[in-house]
């Protein structure tokens, strides 16, 4: 996993920290508003936000960061449904970005998911193209016919 741009902030002033602490103790409802719109957080995200708020209510300085999932080539190949060797060959050709940890290759999960979406899109486009050609032939009944007399 790779650490992505942490953000640090100082603790809250004592009066604000105390008010936040009281609010957290007196309520089970944590509502998140973004641009005036209410968002319901999944349990894990809600717990992380409550933990952050609790730390701030104690006057603690906090650092928030995110972690991006890094996969081994075996994990990435399994996720993509392809062979380990095929995946390594694609990384060698630069089709899928790879990072090295010593001599070990690591691939961002997001890169594999993006590659999978590209493959699905190509399959849909190919199916749409094949479907159109088949429809044209069926409609005219004369694939390859030049319209001349027999």
Image (cartoon, helix red, strand yellow):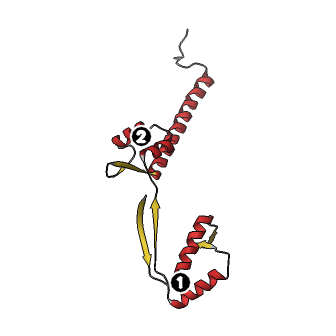
Where residue 44 sits: x, y (%)?
Answer: 59, 65
Name the residue nearer the viewer: 117 or 50.
Answer: 50
Q: Which residue is mark 2?
A: 87
Of labels 1 and 2, the one closer to you: 1
Where residue 133 sits: x, y (%)?
Answer: 55, 28
Q: Is residue 103 left or right of residue 30?
A: left
Where residue 71 sits: x, y (%)?
Answer: 44, 50
The residue lying at 55 percent from left, 88 percent from top is: 16
Q: Residue furthest top?
A: 150
Quarter of the image where the C terminus is located: top right
Q: Which mark is residue 58?
A: 1
Name the residue nearer the viewer: 69 or 146.
Answer: 69
Where residue 147 sits: x, y (%)?
Answer: 54, 16
Q: Number of callouts in the render? A: 2
Check disc 2: other Cα within 10 Å, few if <14, some if 14-19, many if 20+. many
Q: Secondary structure at mark 1?
A: loop
Q: Residue furthest bottom?
A: 15
As measured in the structure, the alpha-carbon distance from the residue carrying label 1 to the one carrying label 2 is 48 Å
Quarter of the image where the N terminus is located: bottom left
Q: Secondary structure at mark 2?
A: helix
Check disc 1: other Cα within 10 Å, few if <14, some if 14-19, many if 20+. some
Q: As displayed, is residue 87 above or below residue 18? A: above
């Amino acid at each position: 996993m790779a650490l992505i741009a942490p953000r640090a902030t100082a603790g809250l002033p004592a009066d604000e920290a105390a008010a936040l602490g009281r609010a957290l103790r007196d309520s089970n409802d944590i509502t998140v508003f973004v641009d005036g719109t209410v968002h319901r957080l999944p349990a894990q995200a809600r717990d992380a936000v409550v933990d952050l708020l609790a730390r701030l209510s104690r006057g603690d300085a906090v650092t928030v960061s995110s972690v991006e999932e890094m996969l081994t080539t075996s994990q990435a190949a399994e996720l993509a449904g392809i062979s380990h060797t095929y995946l390594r060959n694609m990384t060698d050709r630069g089709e899928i970005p790879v990072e090295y940890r010593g001599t070990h290759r690591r691939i961002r999960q997001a890169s594999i998911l993006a590659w999978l979406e590209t493959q699905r899109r190509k399959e849909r486009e190919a199916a749409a193209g094949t479907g159109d050609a088949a429809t044209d032939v069926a409609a005219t009944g004369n694939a390859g016919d030049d319209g001349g007399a027999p």
